[in-house]
Amino acid sequence: MPDASTDPRFGGRPAQPLLIRLSHWINVPLLLLMAGSGLQILWAYPALGPRGAPYWWYPFQGVVPPRWATFGGWLAGARHWHFAIAWFLILNGLIYLLYLLASGEWRRRMFVWSRDAGGAVMMLAYYLRMRRQAPASDFYNGLQRLAYSGVLVLAVAEVLSGLAIYKPLQLWWLAAIFGGYDCARAVHLSVLALIVCFAIVHLLLVALHPRTLVQMITGGGRG
Amino acid sequence: MALAGCDRSSAAKLFLGAMGAWNQRVEQALFSPGWLAPELPPSALTPEEAFPSYFIADDMPFPPDNWALKVGGLVARPAVFSLDDLKRMPRTDMRVRHHCVEGWSAVAGWHGVRLSEIARAVGIDRRARFVEFRSFDAGYWSSWDIESAMHPQTILAYGMNGHPLYPDHGAPLRLYSTVKLGYKMVKYLVEVNFLPEPTGGYWEDQGYEWFAGV
């Protein structure tokens, strides 16, 4: 877990610098609105695959998302919300990424195979009760780094697949990367499911380590 | 998180309205008047019975006996075209992917005459920045930007999958294009008017975005 005192290696910055905290918490309402409006959009055609050729592997053909998980009221409203909030989500993401790189924060947060692969495996083994002790970690353990790097990749895939669905002709090259319109749509929903999985595990682990929540609010200067 | 119907708070409306206007500018900037959707092979065709056909009237609209297409507005030579007149004009065929606002896609072949061909025939005026399309389906209509209307893959289609258009897909004539979402492509056409201002549309006036480009 991150050291409570400010870290001299990172310019005396607290465990969670202000910009990281801001972008983290701004993500909460933005992601909820995007997911909710997205599911309302899905409601209109709750299937994957083109007409006449549904994807055989998708187990929920015709299954509508639960009402409580939708936002926007109807297709038109949901689209307006989805395409409006998207800009802010992307902006928030870009600011976070730029800060991550410019400040050097990526060094202690992002997954580097040679440094973190072993630690990630050992941490997972510890959570699965296959190891008695958690491995030593510096700021974040290997599994955290893997998770937070992974969700970044998911976020980028979600944005790009969304753009491909939005403009399959004008952004034809983007749609092509995802295998065409219907494939991009399947990716967009699948990646949402993975992001939700991440969020559930994230909330669970934060609940098990409540000090991390305090640090994400106060910065961790006093632990 | 669920809302019953549209959010009515004025702050939300202001925000969505402003973002909608911004998004339209982005969409129009993204639009390339020359970029063509790819022609798809016959193997990609959606079985015709699986291609949804929507109309807003209580019953499927059938063309009146004296059907003809009226073309007017800011044009030098307003005209009335019979189906035979349209069939005498240069024919365009395409087999392309359709995108519905609901999220589904489907592939079909369409054939007819380019709208740009019609525009040239009637002498379109430079002030005509918009086109409206009117139908005999309970007043269903839409209006477009002229750039999308003049796209080479925007046609007035009288045929589908190699046969004459059937009533379920807008007989005798429908608007079809590769550059817009399905609800913009008016079926059961009776009028095309080239205008200086947009005139909304059936779904657009209820809250769906007006530009709706793909």
Image: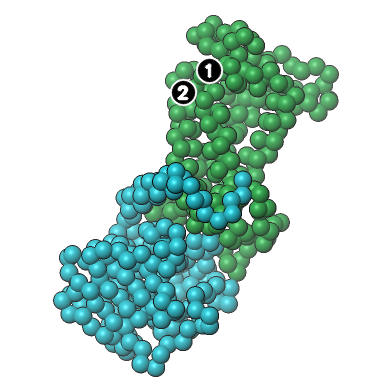
Chain colours: A green, B cyan
Q: Nearer the viewer, residue A25 or B114?
A: A25
Rendered image: mark on residue A17: 1
Amino acid type at image mark 2? Tyr
User: Residue B77 appears in which quarter of the rendering?
Assistant: bottom left
Residue visible at 39% across and 67% down? B201
Q: In the image, residue A202 lies at what x, y percent?
A: 68, 31
Q: In the image, residue A122 lies at what x, y percent?
A: 75, 22
Local SS, label 2: helix
- Give the labeled residue for mark 2: A99
Vertical relation: B202 (above or below) A27: below
**Which chain letter goes with mark 1?**
A
- Left or right: B112 with respect to A68? left
Vertical relation: A76 (above or below) A6: below
- Left or right: B118 with respect to B161? left
Residue A166 shows in the view: yes
**Which chain letter goes with mark 2?**
A
Q: Earlier in the sequence, mark 1 or mark 2?
A: 1
How would you rate the neighbour count of disc 1 (Cα within 10 Å): few for under 14, some for 14-19, many for 20 or more? some
Residue at far bottom of view: B65
Q: Nearer the viewer, residue B109 or B15?
A: B15
Vertical relation: A73 (above or below) A85: below
Rendered image: mark on residue A25: none
Q: Are marks 1 and 2 in contact (CB under 8 Å)?
A: yes
- Left or right: B92 with respect to A1? left
Local SS, label 1: loop
Q: Classify the position of the N terminus of chain B by image quarter.
A: top right
Vertical relation: A111 (above or below) B30: above
Q: Nearer the viewer, residue A62 or B117?
A: A62
Q: Nearer the viewer, residue A105 or A79?
A: A79
Residue visible at 44% across and 43% down? B11
Residues under labels 1 and 2: Cα distance?
A: 10 Å
